Image: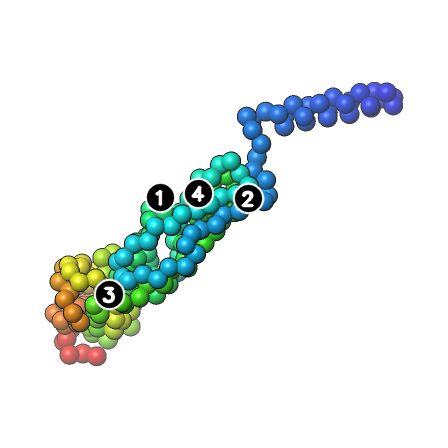
């Protein structure tokens, strides 16, 4: 191909690229998309709620996807940014991710306190079941270690127990919390499985 042919081919290539760039009905979001979550910090009592909002700049698409970072205390957030604190004290991170630019996100720190709530404690039995991984939770929240004290709102709550190999977990129970509450041994005792059968273990075992 002579010099004139190469120039003509290059012109066609440039025109083709320009045509492709013009297709798609719009321009892609630029690299400067930013997301800011308001408020950036929040302190809540157990089971309380907080409305978060997200401001997106750098894109005409201002929609975001809400999530709670794993590893926190297990709060939840709706598609509209309404965060619900769990029944335990600790911290969570709320995240808003741009739908136009998934690499762009903003976050807010949430602290869940026992303020305005009542303490609830469960000490699981026997110690061998605890060593095997027995844990408990409140209202389907994060799994908690035996002996953990959490803050819950006064009223009715459902207690669940984690199934572990070799043990039969207690049946879930519904309790009413009014002031400091400790679950009775009858509600928190695992039974050991032997040859397909369950063998009760003394509740005094530690």
Q: Identify whether 162 is placed above or below 23.
A: below
Task: State the separation of the CA atoms marked 1 and 3.
Answer: 26 Å
Closer to the chain start, of discs 3 and 4, is 4
Q: Residues within 10 Å of mark 4 (few under 14, many from 20)?
A: many
Identify the disc placed on residue 116.
3
Q: Is mark 1 in CB contact (under 8 Å) with mark 2?
A: no
Instruction: Report the residue at 13% width, 62% height from top.
Output: 176
Closer to the chain start, of discs 1 and 2, is 2
Q: Residues within 10 Å of mark 3 (few under 14, many from 20)?
A: some
Q: Is mark 1 in CB contact (under 8 Å) with mark 4?
A: no
Q: Identify whether 104 is placed above or below 72.
A: above
Camera-side mark, 1 or 3: 3
Where does label 4 land, which residue? 64
Where does label 2 land, which residue? 33
Instruction: Report the residue at 22% width, 70% height from top.
Output: 119
How far across and down, in percent of the image, does residue 19 sit? 65, 23
Could you tell me which secondary element the residue under label 2 belongs to?
A: loop
Task: State the separation of the CA atoms marked 3 and 4.
Answer: 32 Å
Task: State the separation of the CA atoms marked 1 and 4.
Answer: 9 Å
Q: Quadrant of residue 79?
A: top left
Where's the C terminus, which quadrant?
bottom left
Instruction: Report the residue at 62% width, 25% height from top.
Output: 22
In this view, the residue in front, 173 or 203, is 173
Q: Quadrant of residue 178?
A: bottom left
Identify the disc placed on residue 80.
1
In the image, 72: left or right of 36? left
Q: Identify whether 174 is placed above or below 7.
A: below
Closer to the chain start, of discs 2 and 3, is 2
**Can residue 157 be seen in the rendering of this structure?**
yes
């Amino acid at each position: 191909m002579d010099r004139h042919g190469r120039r003509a081919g290059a012109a066609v290539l440039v025109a083709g690229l320009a045509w492709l760039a013009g297709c798609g009905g719009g321009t892609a979001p630029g690299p400067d998309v930013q997301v800011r979550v308001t408020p950036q910090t929040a302190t809540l009592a157990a089971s309380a709620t907080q409305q978060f909002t997200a401001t997106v700049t750098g894109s005409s698409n201002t929609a975001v996807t809400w999530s709670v970072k794993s590893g926190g205390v297990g709060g939840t957030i709706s598609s509209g940014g309404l965060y619900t604190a769990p029944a335990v004290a600790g911290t969570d991170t709320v995240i808003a991710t741009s739908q136009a630019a998934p690499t762009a996100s903003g976050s807010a720190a949430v602290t869940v306190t026992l303020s305005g709530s009542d303490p609830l404690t469960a000490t699981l039995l026997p110690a061998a079941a605890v060593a095997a991984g027995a844990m408990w939770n409140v209202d389907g929240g994060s799994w908690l270690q035996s002996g953990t004290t959490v803050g819950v709102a006064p009223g009715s709550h459902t207690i669940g127990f984690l199934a572990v190999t070799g043990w039969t977990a207690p049946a879930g129970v519904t309790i009413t919390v009014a002031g400091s509450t400790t679950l009775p041994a009858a509600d928190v005792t695992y039974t050991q499985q032997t040859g397909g059968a369950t063998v009760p273990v003394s509740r005094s075992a530690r």
